[in-house]
Image (tube, grey):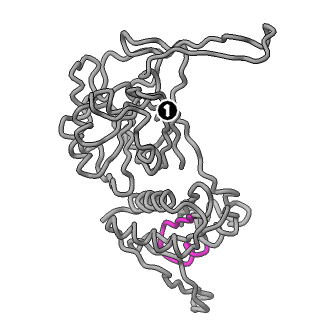
Amino acid sequence: MRDAHEITEAVIGAAMKVHRALGAGFLESVYRNALALELRHVGLAVELEWPLPVHYERTIVGEFSADMLVEKSIIIELKALQNLVPAHEVQTVNHLAATTLEVGLLINFGAPSLQFKRLLRQRILNPANPVDPVRNSVPSARPHLIDITHPLSGATAPWPGDTRFQFSFVSRLRDGASCNVGKFTSGIHSGTHLDAPYHYNESGLTIDHVDLDLLIGPARVVLAQNCSVITREIFAGLDAHATPRVLVRTNHCDDKTQFPADIPTLADDVPAWLGAQGVKLIGLDLPSVDQITEPSMRIHHLLDAANILILESLDLRRAEPGVYDLIALPLKIAGAEGSPVRAVLRH
């Protein structure tokens, strides 16, 4: 049986998928029914309009309904509004406090970006730290952005033998020009970048033809520290139906001014296994999915055979393991084998 943390992450991932498919603007009932379908699709038990009794001095004095109960352990309050206000969190707090459950989720589908807030019964009812739901609730459930892009500068170490990034000004306001105008030169695989299949497959797609839907949506960050080989065990608990993108944080070479001599790599059986699970994109905080001294690009080819895109040199230092919404868009460079990207996580 999944624990509350795993169920919560699965619900958030499913909600992100529903929001990405439907966008904002529908009635709450539409999102409720779609989310229920998605949760049942990934094997979670769902009860709609779950009745909750209201007690006063050990007597039931009324009843109200929570929008959804998942796996008999997570209570969910759904909204379809332009933005959340503190009163909505108060409502969810009251629903959670009326139960013996430990976790509640407030999810809003009506905003341009999915809004959600986790609520823990222990924090609500902790007598050492009492909570006034009105005064101490979070004023906004606006998603938090984590920039997972390494900056490009002259100090960025290129792949050995590749073109180092250089930026300079062609004209400057301070020199009397009408505006500042700059130029840069760089290898495509410097810094945070996306490999197009054409990078390692002569008949593969170039970067201007890569499906952008693969680069936006639910993603799971997993931790793979202190290992030379990234095995299947690192991805334990992965539900690729909810999160078809997986980002691997190794913390192996976060200093981009020094190019590493060696890096962790995926075990040979991992690409096909991830593809069979439904993974469509893998990202790593490493300059490559292959060992630095591996000329055959074996892991690239195995991922290509599994139809998995490759995102490299991410900065995942501030991304704790869990479920996020990934946005990682490349430049539309006609005919190129890859592109720098600006990658962010929404949480």
Relative horizontal placement of residue 295, taking residue 345 as reference (left or right): left
Find numbered disc 1 in the image and state the secondary structure of the residue it sits on.
loop
Residue hosting label 1: 332
Q: Please rate how many residues cluster around mark 1, counting C-alpha atoms within 10 Å: few if below 14, some from 14 to 19, many from 20.
A: some
Query: Furthest-left residue in view?
Result: 269
In the displayed structure, 208 sits above or below 34; it is above
Left or right of 197? Residue 70 is right
Which residue is at the front of the view, 297 or 91? 297
Q: Nearer the viewer, residue 104 or 48?
A: 48
Residue 258 pos. (x, y %): 43, 14
Whether residue 101 is in magenta: the answer is yes
Q: Nearer the viewer, residue 57 or 293?
A: 293
Rendered residue at 42%/78% (across/down): 47
**Quadrant into which the N terminus falls:** bottom left
- Nearer-the-camera pick, 161 or 256: 161
Residue visible at 28% across and 27% down in the picture: 200
**Number of marks in the rendered image:** 1
Q: Bounds of the magenta span?
A: 94-108
Amino acid beneath label 1: Lys
